[in-house]
Structures are given as structure tokens and as C-alpha cells.
Image: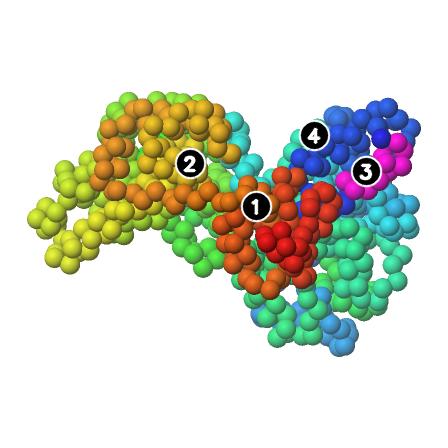
């Protein structure tokens, strides 16, 4: 690589990262990125004098600070006045209109994270400062540089402060907590704490692993001449920052209410947590006229969403035994409405978590519920204790079958394969939608069948008859007939459903489908080498599968006999042709539906995939082809238009 190629490579890496982290529309595979990144590192090691300020290698800080130094903001970081309902909005609008009756309002999400001030000079990121008390914060530049949605350099050369919120996306939050749970570490209470904690790490390499995201919401000191806030913000996004999932310029009460309702409805589907909508006067001149109170701007207000955190009381702590035997403590709480949903239970994860938070029966606690986040207790109000609270002891014996429990790292497990809870839950799993999809086999019925001694394993389901069912309480002719029919209709199921229903560790729906496709009914005789040949099946999965079959060979064979599953259709060998065995991606509008073209190509023996990678052989494009086409070109993958494809087929 020479200097010119190095400069180009940095630009390319930054473009790929911008597509990935800012536009949410990747145009390069991780592998492709890593390869070029590696070359850049090699060049920089040989020519340290050439290292560019905006090289992605400059994001990885390896210096651990002993503490953060205080740093003043160039202009104050304000907070916002809160309003909670239409009445509050009405009053705020009246006040605002008294100051200026011609204003319009810019509405955008209020992100729930940690605020951050970025100072750029000469187009370079100079400082990243936490909010602190609004006047002075902490200097955390090395941490900030690890955040990929913050450009290291921008096209704007004058000095500017760009303010925004650092957040962790909801799925990332669940991932981090799952890892921490596994490692026996303390869980983060919510994405906000996780974001704030990650941002203030003394070791920036830890910050780098947390996939933080920066969402700009305004500017401090700046020399921009736009007359409207909406224009200023468009300019900021265009410099390489992320846009909000929804923003709108509104005229007055009705329009603000409408966009508020829309955002409240849609927010569950956004990747980040919101705690409200911010309403800001859009005209900059009017903002300046209106000015600030001692604490907050008069030209902006936070219109909060209903709280997702509530105070309630723990009534009991019960133990649940799952189909794999893991014992999970669950808090039963005083039913509390949060954002339209009644919460009665909150997961406590495991006993290490209970100890760490010191959760006791009758404690007053704060619980959190939000979109995809499972209700959980985030804090015990210890100051409210009366002395009557009761600690729960770690169980020694299974609460269901009484057998001795095994402590396996942070997990406590019931080892008894015949434990009622394990059997009942495996039967429920067996019947669930993604398995055999048998209606009517819920917790109550399965428990009843089990305790009547009628069903001790999934195989017994197929020996049920009307006589047996009618002898049970609550079963009349119709209910019995329906259940028997539902069980019978599982016969002749697709083979992958049977494999999935076995509940083998590490073997989920996708793996079950691949195994069914590769082996058909012969899956019972699969050997390790053959399993490993399947793309996506690794050592651990193969071993788990084989071990399960070894132990349960008889049951599995009987299930196959009873269920008579159908094998997936094996594709007929196609004649020799240019598409046989090739991976093809379709994009854009074509003369026929893409589904039809896909069928044709598959009949020729091609594999039609949804995304472009190095392994793609052809990208076939129609009109208005977008990023997949661009990606093909940048990866050097062959592209064909529809006509060229037809010619090749002929
Ligand atoms: S504007 C002068 N806009 O909420 C304007 N703040 O309660 C001051 N926040 O400290 C802030 N999303 O950290 C603004 N779209 C948004 C916001 C937002 C989140 C945070 C910010 C601020 C706090 C104020």
C-alpha cells in the first residue's frame, strides 16, 4: 500500500462505517471491513508520520486514566421543564404564544441516555465532555472517540459544540445483561444506566465494547446562520451524524398532540429508549428573544411519556423450574399498571441477583417495564423497610419434586429428568407454535394430564383416548374431541418440527431445518463429520445433538414412528447451466415478480440469497436497484441485468 492508497483506504473504511453506524444500511461485510482495516494498520505501523486524524485506528484508546479532569463547556448545557399531559401542553403553549404568537414548533424524541457535548475545531473532534452540572463536566475524549456514530472529523471548519444523547440500543442492552448474568456480574438496571456507566469508564477499551450510539439534539456555541432549528439540525445530520427516527415541524396544539401520540405508539419499535418528546420553538430569533429562566429555556419543553418505572410491593418470591431444570426466582408483586399493561411478576434472574440487590418479601421496590425489556426490579427502597421483610434462602431441594438441586456456576438446576415441572414444561414446549403446534396443551391441561397419571412423557400424548379424557374434571365431549383432534393433526408434520420439539440444547428452529434438509429421516444416524459439513453448525451444536440422540434414541425412534413426519423435498439435480450451484442475489424491480425469478433460478440449481457478500456469485438487478447493487460493485461481484440473465439461461 502506498500513501495514496492508504488515504483512499481510510476514506473507504469511514464510508463503510458511516453506512453501518449512522445510516443503519451496511454496504460491506464485517470480514471485508476487517481486511482493509488490517491493511491500514500495517501501513500506519510502517509510516506513523502519515497517520490521518480520521483513521478508524484512532478510535481505539489504550490509555487507562486514573480519573477524569473537569472541563468547562463553552456555553451552558441546559435542562428542560417537564410536562405530562395535554393540559400541561396547553398551558406551556399559552405562555410561549404570549412571548411570540407566530412561532412554529420542532418536535423530536427525548432520548433516555446520558448527555454529551462535543467540541469540534478546524473540523476535528477536540473534546468530549459529560454534562456535569451544565457548566463544567468531565473530559472523556478517549471514550467518546470509540463511539462509531461520532465522526472524528467533519466538513465544518469553524468551532462548534454539538450536543446530544449517548444511548445503548435495547437489543444491545439485553445482550450486555445476558453476558453479565452469565459472568455472574451485577446487571445494569436499564439502558440509561448502562449508557452512562459505559461512557464514564476509565478504560476506553471497555467503552468501545458497549456499542454506544450518539444521537445529536442541538448545538451550543456555533456560527451557523440558519434561521430555523430544523435547518440547523439537517445541517448537523448531513455532517455525518445520526437522524432521529421521527421529527416534525408543527403549528400548534393539535399537531403537537398528534405527533406525540404517534411517537408514543411507535416508540416500542424504535431501537432506542425514549422517555418523551421534546417540543422546541423552531425560529432561532424567537428562541433568542424568549431566553432562559434560571434553569431551563423558555422556548423548549419535555413532553414526557407515561412512566415505565413504578413503585410496588413484593408479595412473594416463588421458584420456577423450566424444562431444562433451571430454577428461576420470580417476584410476585402488587399488580401495578405501567403504560397500559398490568405487571404482576418480575424476573429476578438468579439468587446472586437477589443477594446483590438484597430483595426481600414485603420490600417496596421500583420496577421497570419497557417495550422489549422484561419487567424487572431495579431498586429496593430500603429506607421504607419496617423490619417485617423476609429474606428468601437459596433452595437446596427442587420446589416441585424435592430432589437435591445442583449449583452450576450462577445457575441452580433440578437434575431429575422425571421432575413434574420439567416434564410438564417439555410437553408444553413440544406442543408450542414453533414445534408441533398442538392447540389446547397449555399449563393447566398438561398439569392435569400429568397428575392424573395419563401423560408422563410426550409419547403418552398419542395414547390418549376419549374415555381417558372424559374421566377428567372439566372435560366434556367437545373439549375431549378437540384435544384429541389437535394431537392427531400433528401426525405428518414437517420433519424439522419434530427435531425442534425435542428441545435439544443449542439446536433451534434454523438448525433443525438444516438438519432435516441434509439428512431427512436418516437424521437419527447422522455422524459428527457430516453435521459439521452443514454451514452454521459448529462443534458444540453437533456434540449436543449427538449426545441427545445417544441418550434418547428409543424415544426419538418411537416419535418418528408415531408422527410419520414428512421429509423436506430434495431438489432434483439440475442440468449443467451457468447458475447451477451459484449464489445469486436479486434486487430492484424486474419484469416479473422477484418470487417467480427466484423459483426459476432455484430450479436451475442456484441458491438465492437476500444479502450480498464476498461469497455472492451474481447480483441480478432490475430498475431502481439500491444499496445491494452498490455493494456488489464495491466488492467486485459480477452484476447482470435481467436481459443478460435471460441470455445466460438460454
Ligand atoms: S434539548 C436547551 N433535546 O434531556 C435544550 N434534550 O431534561 C436542552 N435530552 O440534559 C436540551 N433528548 O440530556 C434536548 N431531543 C432532546 C433530548 C434532550 C434527550 C436530554 C438531555 C438534557 C435532558 C433535559
Front label number (4 vs 2): 2
Report which quarter residue 144 is drawn in.
top right
Given residues 147 and 329, the one toward you in this image is 147
Secondary structure, mark 1, is: loop
| Residue found 51% across the figure and 45% down from its top | 575
Q: Which mark is residue 205?
A: 4
Q: Which residue is mark 2?
A: 518
Which x, y percent locates residue 467? 8, 48
Give me the C-alpha separation between circle 1 and circle 3: 38 Å
122 left or right, relative to 317: right
Front label number (4 vs 3): 3
Which x, y percent locates residue 46? 86, 24
Q: Which residue is mark 3?
A: 9
Q: Residues within 10 Å of mark 1 (few under 14, many from 20)?
A: some
User: Mark 3 or mark 2: which comes first in sequence?
Assistant: 3
| Residue found 34% across the figure and 33% down from its top | 522
Q: Which residue range is magenta in the image?
A: 2-13
Secondary structure, mark 4, is: helix
Secondary structure, mark 3, is: helix
Which x, y percent locates residue 555? 24, 31
- The answer to whether the residues at label 3 and label 2 have Cβ atoms under 8 Å apart is no
On whether ligand 1 comes within 8 Å of the CB at mark 2, the answer is no
Q: Which residue is mark 1?
A: 577
533, above or below 481, in the image: above
Residue 130 in sight here: yes
Front label number (1 vs 2): 1
User: Mark 4 or mark 3: which comes first in sequence?
Assistant: 3
Give me the C-alpha separation between circle 3 and circle 2: 41 Å
User: Mark 1 or mark 4: which comes first in sequence?
Assistant: 4
Q: Is residue 10 magenta?
A: yes
Give me the C-alpha separation between circle 4 and circle 2: 42 Å
Amino acid at each position: 500500500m502506498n500513501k495514496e492508497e492508504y488515504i483512499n483506504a481510510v476514506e473507504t473504511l469511514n464510508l463503510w462505517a458511516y453506512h453501518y453506524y449512522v445510516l443503519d444500511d451496511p454496504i460491506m461485510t464485517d470480514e471485508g471491513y476487517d481486511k482493509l482495516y488490517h491493511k491500514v494498520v500495517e501501513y500506519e505501523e510502517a509510516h506513523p508520520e502519515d497517520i490521518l486524524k480520521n483513521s478508524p485506528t484512532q478510535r481505539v484508546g489504550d490509555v487507562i486514566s486514573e480519573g477524569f479532569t473537569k472541563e468547562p463547556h463553552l456555553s451552558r448545557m441546559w435542562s428542560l421543564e417537564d410536562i405530562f399531559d395535554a393540559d400541561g401542553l396547553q398551558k406551556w403553549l399559552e405562555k410561549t404564544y404570549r412571548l411570540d404568537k407566530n412561532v412554529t414548533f420542532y418536535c423530536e424524541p427525548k432520548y433516555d441516555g446520558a448527555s454529551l457535548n462535543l467540541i469540534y475545531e478546524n473540523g476535528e473532534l477536540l473534546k468530549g465532555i459529560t454534562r456535569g452540572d451544565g457548566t463544567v463536566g468531565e473530559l472523556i475524549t478517549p471514550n467518546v472517540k470509540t463511539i462509531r456514530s461520532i465522526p472524528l472529523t467533519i466538513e465544518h471548519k469553524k468551532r462548534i459544540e454539538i450536543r446530544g444523547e449517548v444511548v445503548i440500543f435495547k437489543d444491545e442492552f439485553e445482550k450486555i445483561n445476558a453476558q453479565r448474568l452469565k459472568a455472574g456480574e451485577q446487571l445494569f438496571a436499564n439502558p440509561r444506566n448502562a449508557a452512562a456507566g459505559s461512557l464514564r469508564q476509565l478504560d476506553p477499551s471497555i467503552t468501545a465494547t458497549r456499542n454506544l450510539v450518539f444521537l445529536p439534539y442541538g448545538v451550543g456555541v456555533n456560527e451557523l446562520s440558519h434561521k430555523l432549528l430544523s435547518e440547523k439540525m439537517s445541517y448537523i445530520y448531513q455532517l455525518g451524524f445520526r437522524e432521529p427516527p421521527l421529527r416534525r415541524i408543527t403549528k400548534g396544539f393539535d399537531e403537537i398532540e398528534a405527533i406525540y401520540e404517534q411517537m408514543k405508539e411507535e416508540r416500542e419499535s424504535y431501537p432506542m429508549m425514549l422517555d418523551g418528546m421534546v417540543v422546541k420553538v423552531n425560529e432561532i430569533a424567537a428562541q433568542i428573544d424568549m431566553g432562559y429562566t434560571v434553569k431551563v429555556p423558555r422556548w423548549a419543553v419535555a413532553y414526557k411519556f407515561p412512566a415505565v418505572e413504578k413503585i410496588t410491593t413484593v408479595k412473594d418470591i416463588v421458584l420456577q423450574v423450566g424444562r431444562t431444570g433451571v430454577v428461576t426466582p420470580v417476584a410476585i408483586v402488587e399488580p401495578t399498571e405501567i403504560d397500559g399493561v398490568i405487571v404482576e411478576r418480575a424476573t429476578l434472574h438468579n439468587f446472586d441477583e437477589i443477594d446483590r440487590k438484597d430483595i426481600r418479601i414485603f420490600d417496596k421496590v421500583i420496577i421497570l417495564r419497557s417495550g422489549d425489556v422484561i419487567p424487572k426490579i431495579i431498586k429496593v427502597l430500603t429506607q421504607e423497610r419496617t423490619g417485617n421483610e423476609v429474606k428468601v434462602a437459596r433452595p437446596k431441594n427442587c420446589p416441585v419434586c424435592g430432589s437435591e438441586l445442583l449449583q452450576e456456576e450462577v445457575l441452580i438446576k433440578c437434575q431429575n429428568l422425571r421432575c413434574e415441572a420439567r416434564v410438564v414444561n417439555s410437553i408444553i414446549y413440544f406442543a408450542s407454535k414453533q414445534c408441533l403446534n398442538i392447540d389446547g396443551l397449555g399449563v393447566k391441561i398438561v398439569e392435569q394430564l400429568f397428575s392424573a397419571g395419563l401423560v408422563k412423557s410426550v409419547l403418552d400424548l398419542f395414547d390418549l383416548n376419549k374415555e381417558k379424557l372424559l374421566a377428567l374434571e372439566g372435560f366434556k365431549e367437545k373439549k375431549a374431541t378437540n384435544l384429541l383432534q389437535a394431537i392427531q393433526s400433528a401426525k405428518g408434520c414437517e420433519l424439522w418440527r419434530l427435531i425442534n420439539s425435542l428441545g435439544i440444547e443449542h439446536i433451534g428452529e434454523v438448525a433443525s431445518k438444516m438438519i432435516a434438509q441434509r439428512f431427512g429421516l436418516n437424521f437419527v444416524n447422522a455422524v459428527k463429520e457430516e453435521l459439521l459439513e452443514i454451514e452454521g453448525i459448529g462443534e458444540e451444536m453437533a456434540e449436543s445433538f449427538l449426545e441427545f440422540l445417544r441418550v434418547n434414541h428409543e424415544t426419538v425412534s418411537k416419535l418418528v414412528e408415531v408422527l410419520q413426519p414428512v421429509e423436506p423435498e430434495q431438489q432434483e439435480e439440475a442440468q449443467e447451466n451457468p447458475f447451477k450451484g451459484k449464489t445469486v442475489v436479486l434486487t430492484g424491480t424486474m419484469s416479473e415478480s422477484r418470487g417467480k425469478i427466484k423459483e426459476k433460478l432455484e430450479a436451475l440449481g442456484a441458491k438465492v440469497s437476500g444479502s450480498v457478500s464476498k461469497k455472492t456469485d451474481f447480483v441480478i438487478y432490475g430498475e431502481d436497484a439500491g444499496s445491494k447493487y452498490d455493494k456488489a460493485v464495491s466488492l467486485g461481484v459480477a452484476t447482470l441485468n435481467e436481459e443478460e440473465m435471460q441470455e445466460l439461461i438460454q
